[in-house]
Image (cartoon, rainbow, N blue to C red):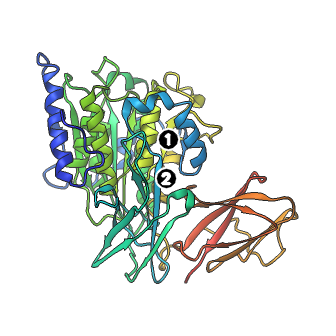
Amino acid sequence: MPTFPCPADRPEEEEAIVAEAKAEAVKEMPTRRIAPQEDHTPTEDTEDIPWNEVLKKLPKPQQLTAGELNDFSKWELWAEVSQEDLGHHRHTWQQYPKHRYTVQLTNTAGGAVVNASVQLVDPQGQILWRARTDAQGRAELWAYYCQESAPSLEGLRIQGSAAAYDFELLDVKAFQEGINFHTLPLACVSQAVVDVAFVVDATGSMSDEIYYLQAEILDVMQRAKDTLRGGDLRLGSLFYRDLSDTYLTRRHALSANIGSTVSFMQAQSAGGGGDGPEAVEAALETTLDHLNWRDHATTRLLFLVLDAPPHQAADNVKRMQAATLRAAAMGIQIIPVSCSGIAQSTEYLMRSMALATNGTYTFLTNHSGIGQKHLEPSTTSYEVEHLNDLLLRLLIARSRLKGCGNAPPNTEGVVHTQANTVPESWSFYPNPTAGPFTIESGGPDVVGFLLDSDGKLLQRFTVQGTFELDLSRYAAGQYWLKLDNQQAAQPIILNKM
């Protein structure tokens, strides 16, 4: 088995390694029948199936409880947790999201440049990472992702293309030194084009939660369709089991006929499995290769619902690496939903894949009383929400376009300020702003944090009396300011119109 080229500078190298890894995996179990992969997509679109009729067959939604860990918002904590609490699992999966490079692309009108291809390149011209910008015009790039220790990080470059424009940024900054900004003379994107896939473990161990999960997911899609009016929303799904079960994967293509996909999802049940690990790698490969993701989509989300890890054989580890790289290159954000039975090893893998693909990590909690015991994640704190509300929040926030006359940010609760009008301890102004933003601390030095609307940490700074924050290079929209001596965050409206 050759060394896995993680990163690989040519996609065909990844494909060849994955093909060989699959063949090796099959050789290891010559007496086992390999389960089939099924495509249940209708050959022609049928009329939308009434949602209410489908939902009547399932439990009521808003019963499961969940939490979110956006490790981008607690980047320093992730560095600590991944080395200590979860550190001994890093070698199992050989995924190391450490060397982070963030790029922000905007157009001259202050809007986000969406779905641009970007790549991180070393001085010898080898591509270290490929990604696409999200609805906020940002992409996360990683250097030497599959290596525990990296060679020199000097002289790295970011190359990219959007529409007819190619660009290159030299001597780029790692995230701890700032964000890499670039402006392109492109028109604004006016319509959200959203592809959403739910990939669900359907083995027997999921039987305690799968019907509740189906109800929550279908409720999310019904509400998303209503909320994203004017957007182009498609839903697809894939259910998976294991190699010797009645089926390996069972899929329904991404379709604007959401009723058809909903009916497919409702018809699935849990069964099979039995040996702990399941065919997660096969599920991801099939989802990436055989669901009809649109190249021009502005948002692509893959919700991975599971309660067991992939098999840990060396070939499967390589396949999971390859799937992570390919999802990032396709601009598909992986959002795991960890269910009962998840152990810390799987938690580390899922949080790593979420970071690598610009996603976030979610998990069920014990607060609902449904299902078996759920693992408490390795973190300082988290907020408990209903699962359907959490997933809808993530879907909507990651689908809405930023700036350029798109739907204005929600200004509810925003303090419109001039100098010295809020807070006895500190003040900030002006809000809304076109870019320049002043923060004044009324006490000792304080650390400040700038976060985007998804809670992702963008900038860390120290306020020594007065601090001038420049937001002019970010896309128009809503941001959050938090000082480490304050419990709450204050919204900031960046208005470039």
Identified at 48% across, 43% down, the residue is: 361
Picture quadrant where residue 154 is located:
bottom left
Amino acid bearing label 2: Leu
Task: Say if mark 2 contacts mark 1, CB within 8 Å.
Answer: yes
Estimate the spatial distance between the alpha carbons at disc 2 and disc 1, rounded to whole Å: 10 Å
Residue 266 in the image, given as x and y percentages of width and height: 32, 38
Q: In the rendering, which numbered label is found on residue 362?
A: 1
Residue 163 in the image, given as x and y percentages of width and height: 29, 76
Observer able to see residue 409: no
Identified at 56% across, 61% down, the residue is: 177
Question: Which mark sits nearer the N-terminus, 2 or 1?
Answer: 1
Q: In the rendering, which numbered label is found on residue 182?
A: none
Mark 1 packing: few (<14 Cα in 10 Å), some, or many (20+)? many
Image quarter (top left, top right, bottom left or bottom right) of the C terminus: bottom right
Identified at 52% across, 37% down, the residue is: 82
Observer able to see residue 93: yes
Residue position marked by numbered label 2 in the rendering: 394
Amino acid bearing label 1: Thr
Picture quadrant where residue 267 is located:
top left
